[in-house]
Amino acid sequence: MALIKSISGIRGTIGGSTNDNFTPVDIVKFTAAYGTLLLEQNGNKKVVVGRDGRISGEMVKNLVIATLNALGIDVVDLDYSTTPTVEMAVVFEEAAGGIILTASHNPKEWNALKLLNSTGEFIDAAQGAKVLEIAAREDFNFVSVDKLGTVIKDESSLQKHIDAVLNYPLVDVAAIKKAKFKIVLDAVNSTGAIAVPALLKALGLKDIIVLNEEVNGKFAHNPEPLPEHLTELSAEVVKQNADLGIAVDPDVDRLCFVCEDGSMFGEEYTLVAVADYVLSKRKGNTVSNMSSTRALRDVTEKNGGEYFPSAVGEVNVVTKMKAVNAIIGGEGNGGIIVPDLHYGRDALIGIALFLTHLAESKKSIKQLRNTYPSYFISKNKIALENGIDVKDVFTKIKTKYKNNPINTEDGLKIEFDTDWVHLRTSNTEPIIRIYAESNFETTADNIAKRLMKDISEAM
């Protein structure tokens, strides 16, 4: 069905033929290429491996670990884990790198290799290109039987991650405990069912209801935490008379909230609210990708900082954050990056900072949401058929809107006075994403529909 090679790693669907799908042969080939890259870079022969709750997770993990061992690399096996936990474990273990086995928000038939460097950050474009080059040549040198790597089981990394969150200076555990929040969590049948309740209990909260709690990878709904997929969570928040609802994606790097009346806080506003809290305590700059709401710019400037946009993709956000010395950043999909904890999207630190903000505000979550400007983003996508020349499509769109301000750093971002639309190919799926923002929901929808029509005609 699909095999996608990008800065987001090697991602594809289970089953089918090699080179076109995420098959055992492809898993071994790209793992061997990554391991070879690490061995070329330094003499460190330790790699951390963790996985989300996907059905294919154990199979993929066994292939990955065996391949790394065959290269003479020792593996720290976290088994069920989260993306941010693996990122932090690379540093805890002083490893050469890490592999997270997750296709993030993609449906159950997908899985992926997300590749990390020795600082627990995603490998950059140059390293990614080198992995693809080594894989294409199949330039691997496996070791003799006496030099095979070992496997070390590790069950402490999640607790170390939680401890780091609890000890983060802007997390007020006492305030959260005193607030006695009643929370409903949608864990979407993945490792959020393990990590998030453990964090909430460590924060002193006791009234926690978990939906889709069994870690079996049979996602109860589409795992992307969008409003249309969270109807069960919304209904349960109201039914339980809870203070708020929390939803995470399968690998726990995206985060969104539901208000006490069942309405969405808005995944775009996860970063806005957390940044507002952080900026109220520390002055500094912020970064989000150019598909994210301009509300982050508003709260940044209100707090005396400067906002900077980046290309879409966590690697690009992190690069920009380092360049402008941002104290917080992330993506409008609910991804929070707190650099002095680690440079990676992390729902656990996001939850702790958000709950601190909510507790200190003395407001309900709905009241807190109403303190922020209301912009509306219409998020849409068009499937790409094989053979479509996206570059040609975008050239036609650019020509049509040549009189408007256009940014081509990442696809096409077209401005219409105070409104905008961003068109780009996805790093994780064979689609074009169309995001449009306006003060009015109908206007955002209409801009998106107009551009989708333009794209269809250009195809």
Image (cartoon, rainbow, N blue to C red):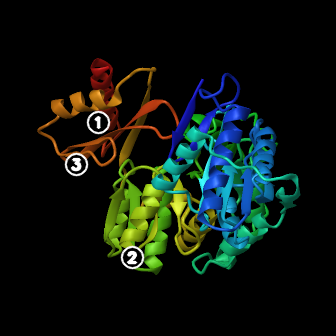
Q: Disc 2 versus disc 1: distance between alpha carbons?
A: 33 Å
Residue type of the residue flagged with mark 3: Thr
The residue pinned by badge 3 equals 418
Residues at discs 3 and 1 in contact (Cβ within 8 Å): no
| Number of other residues with Cα within 10 Å of mark 3, as a class: few under 14, some 14 to 19, many 20 or more | few
Q: Earlier in the sequence, mark 3 or mark 1?
A: 3
| Number of other residues with Cα within 10 Å of mark 2, as a class: few under 14, some 14 to 19, many 20 or more | many
State the mark number for residue 443.
Answer: 1
Is there any visible trace of residue 50 in the rendered image?
A: yes
Q: Give the quarter of the figure containing the C terminus.
A: top left
Q: Which residue sits at x=43%, y=59%? A: 317
Does residue 172 lie above or below 380 as drawn? below
Relative placement, left or right, of 79 versus 429 is right
Counting from the top left corner in percent of width and height, residue 285 is at 37, 72
Q: Earlier in the sequence, mark 2 or mark 1?
A: 2
Q: Which residue sits at x=59%, y=26%? A: 20
Indicate the secondary structure of the residue bearing disc 1.
Answer: helix
Q: Disc 3 versus disc 2: distance between alpha carbons?
A: 25 Å
Residue type of the residue flagged with mark 2: Gly
Counting from the top left corner in percent of width and height, residue 28 is at 71, 40
Residues at discs 3 and 2 in contact (Cβ within 8 Å): no
Q: Which residue sits at x=67%, y=79%? A: 167
Residue closer to the observer: 229 or 156:
156
Residue closer to the observer: 216 or 62:
62
Indicate the secondary structure of the residue bearing disc 3.
Answer: loop
Mark nearest the camera among 3 and 2 is: 2
Mark nearest the camera among 3 and 1 is: 3
Residue type of the residue flagged with mark 1: Thr
State the mark number for residue 284.
Answer: 2
Does residue 419 lie above or below 222 as drawn? below
